[in-house]
Amino acid sequence: MAASTCCSSTPCKHHSPSLPKPYNSSSFPSHLPLKFRKFTSRATAAATVFCTLAHDAAAAVVMQEAPPSLDLPRPDSFGRFGKYGGKYVPETLMYALSELETAFRSLAGDPDFERELDGILKDYVGRESPLYFAERLTEHYKRPDGEGPHIYLKREDLNHTGAHKINNAVAQALLAKRLGKQRIIAETGAGQHGVATATVCARFGLQCIIYMGAQDMERQALNVFRMQLLGAEVRPVHSGTATLKDATSEAIRDWVTNVETTHYILGSVAGPHPYPMMVREFHKVIGKETRKQALEKWGGKPDVLVACVGGGSNAMGLFHEFVDDKDVRLIGVEAAGYGLDSGKHAATLTKGEVGVLHGAMSYLLQDDDGQIIEPHSISAGLDYPGVGPEHSFLKDTGRAEYYSVTDDEALEAFKRLSRLEGIIPALETSHALAYLEKLCPTLPNGTKVVLNCSGRGDKDVQTAIKYLQPLLPLPSARHLRCFPSLPLSHTHDPSPLLLHSPASFDFGEAFRFELKRVSHIGMTLFGFIDGSSTDAQGMDAYCRSGLAFVAL
Amino acid sequence: MACGSFNYSFFANSVGKEMCEKRKTGNIAKVATCSLAVQGNTSTTAKPVVEVPADQNSTFINLGRSSTKRRFETHRCQETIEEIIGNGKFGRFGGKFVPETLITCLNMLEAEFRSVLHDVQFQAELATALRDYVGRETPLYYAQRLTEHYKSKSCSGEGPEIYLKREDLNHGGAHKMNNAIAQAMIARRMGRTRVVAATGAGQHGVATAAACAKLSLECTVFMGTKDIEKQSSNVLLMKLLGAQVKSVAGNFKDATSEAFRNWVNDLETSYYLTGTVVGPHPCPSMVREFQSVIGKETRKQALEKWGGEPDVLVACVGSGSNALGLFHEFIDDEDVRLIGVEGAGIGLDSGHHSATLTRGEVGVYHGAMSYLLQDHEGQIVGPHSIGVGLEYPGVSPELSFLKDSGRAEFHTATDQEALDAYRLLCRLEGIFPALEACHALAFLDKLCPTLRSGTKVVVNCSGRGDKDAAIVFNSKLT
């Protein structure tokens, strides 16, 4: 307790200069008290950290005063990346976090653990994932004089379960097993993280409990079913808005209660120390393989690395290996949603301010009261109001660059890669791909760009279709029939057109309307005009499967 | 069709035999041969080249010239190119039962296939594509908890060790990609700009669409209306990949017929991309060659993992591409049991099944002779299976031959057994298998109790089952 009094004042003093917001905004006096509230609570929380961890207050002071430098270990012994990171958590969780850190540090160097993990990564996850030269994408970005960068994709989409996430989930489950914890909890929004967690729990025979907002459960019934198939118990959360953030709170409550038997699998490089470090270490295999494969393929290093950033795990996994290679450009791409100025985005590093969320200090999307602003992105995986603390640090030191792309740009990129390479990327990954549009014209000929293709887009097809096709929704199969005598030949030959004709519908109007859309978008419609039974059946099948009028 | 006409000692060409036997005597140990055979996917370039003038007229006469048969004799000898191509006959099965108009086209295809097997550059390109694009090699995964499950079910607590060949990790989610990318490359090499394909479960369609997108070819996929309903997610993927999806009333067999008709109308510019080991020669040989990488990798990985061969291979059989891809490498190793599992639908006696080899009779369909589901008038009986990819009334001629010769065994699993296997693998291993592959997994229930402890069983996990979650979901409700 003595230590507590001693150091609770120290961090306050040394902390404050590094917090920009309260001082920057002092010209707006009306905001001042609110800012102070934010600031004070942060300092108090910081005190908790020091009390528990810092046995030597003087050491803490030295660390605080050091300018942000890449040469220091990341994170430092307090779990901080510069001023970011830390352990802003209730006291009850401190023990679990310390235990986790100790276990991680001892296992990270343990050859047995390494061997077991490597075996699983190879045979279960399917590593190593290829570094694929995207020939037609490269061709696409060639300038008129035939020059342009070479684009390589790191194919994390070929992993088991279709994304990089499994690298970390598998490793954490193995860690939990080593710790003797038989119960795993996690929360999920759209269900992807839940499915990944349930998958590894099934693999290791661990009990798995997934918290999910009741509303999300209804929307994602199939993913709920998947998790149940994998043997997980999905617990609906009814409190609050019954979505992800309420599920997170509920999961944390569970962890606090059952901390001795339970491991909490966090899916990103966010959260309190040691999670950002641990998740990064489990993902760094991406960068390591990239270095090795680059050496094999062109005998050198990549020149530019590009990855999307939501929480930031796939980007960190790729970047970490190259942070010390100063000649490698690191580029993170965030989601700008409807546009950075619309307020509907998830561009935390570009537009956020420093604050504390989910146990760590980092850039956040917050309002003047320090309350979280609901982020928006077309991709569920980037839809996060915070970002990994190490990214905040890399941004401040200027080591990495961060940009953003909008939903529309991402969708274009989604379509582009599907068409050019036959690879359907996740919508998250599409953000990184979209940035190539701006990046490539600026790069000299022959630059080697490695882009982390972090996930496959099978899960996003429905979303993409919804946005990509602006056609009329059709009422139902019963309202459809073939129209035998439309004079289509001279207007839209040979692509057939399907029309709907409920009795009350003005047929001529609908026809003109559709035709205009068709010629405008240049798409082919499904549908059948000759009224033969074959085609009517075909059309019916499309309609029943909800595919009528889907076109790209 | 007389079935006693094969001749075990009949050789298509004596040169090939001689070369084979020379090589055979050079191979001291079995293991040495294995490692020879699997060094790189493109080992064909190292093979002796034996040119034999293709004699079309003899195709129909020499029923005994089975390349498979021949390899029984020249035991464990590496295949020559001529052996890979064969003459289209597997015992009495196979052949080229097509209208005269198509013969030229098939001959062209055969010539092209022969020339790519010679082409070092093509083979190198294919190897790169398989490694970097498809994501090979796929792991041979020891299914620890599945193994324990079967051990715990036996009274002695012992049982076989089960390994899964993870073809579900391929780009596109199934083994189909191995063949699609290779054939699309052939199409491009032939200067064709348009690819036509037919698909059942949509896996072949997705693979073809992806390969065409990568190689900048136009792609049209024919699909049965019933299958479109069942596999709508795959339809969306194909469209997204830029393919045109055309619906055909019925299921896979109707789609195939329609795709064939479409191709015949435009032989000059389009290429018909067969997804499976059926159809007229050289399609079965070609697809089998491109899928045989599965077996080659399995041999290499087995050698690394336990220093031997697998004892039992299990794969599902619809028309047979994934089974043959796994089996082919081991046909000459007669101590390896080959087990194919067909879809018994809602029961073999119900009439609603797709157990062609178990219940079919010999006939000619889609250009080749094989076992078929047919009625008394020789008309095709519509097949049924919950695994859409298994719903085909015919089967590979080579598998038909392996059945008759007794080299491979064929069994069946019902829809319900497949669904149970789906749930079991999800629960125990965290892997969603395709419903097709579930049939192979379901047979483990019957197989495992009969096997000695420590037997190495390799099951081909031919595809991932994300696409089938909805079907399993609905089956729960009914």
Image (cartoon, grey):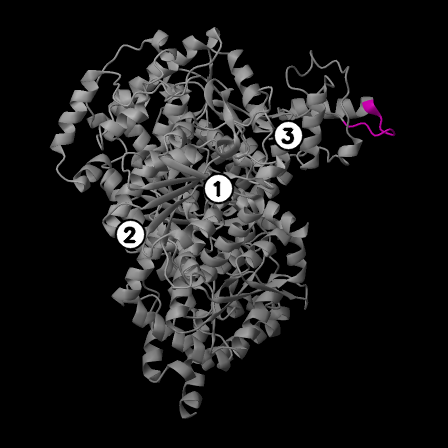
Q: Magenta span: helix, strand or loop, mainly?
A: loop
Q: Which residue is mark 2?
A: A326
Q: Amino acid at mark 3?
A: Thr
Q: Amino acid at mark 1?
A: Pro
Badge 2 crowding class, 10 Å Cα cut-off, few under 14, some 14 to 19, many 20 or more, is: few
Identify the residue at horizontal 64%, vertical 66% (top origin).
A237
Q: Quadrant of residue B229?
A: top right
Above or below, A305 relative to A11 = above
Q: Residues within 10 Å of mark 1 (few under 14, many from 20)?
A: many
* Magenta residues, start to end: A500-507
**Chain to which the residue tagged by mark 2 belongs:** A
Q: Which residue is mark 3?
A: B225
Provide residue A522's location: percent of width, then percent of height: 62, 24
- Residue A530 in percent (x, y) is at 72, 16
Residue B256 makes an appearance in the image: yes
Residue A506 on image: x %, y %: 85, 26
Residue B129: quadrant of the picture: top left
Q: Which numbered tag is attached to residue A425?
A: 1
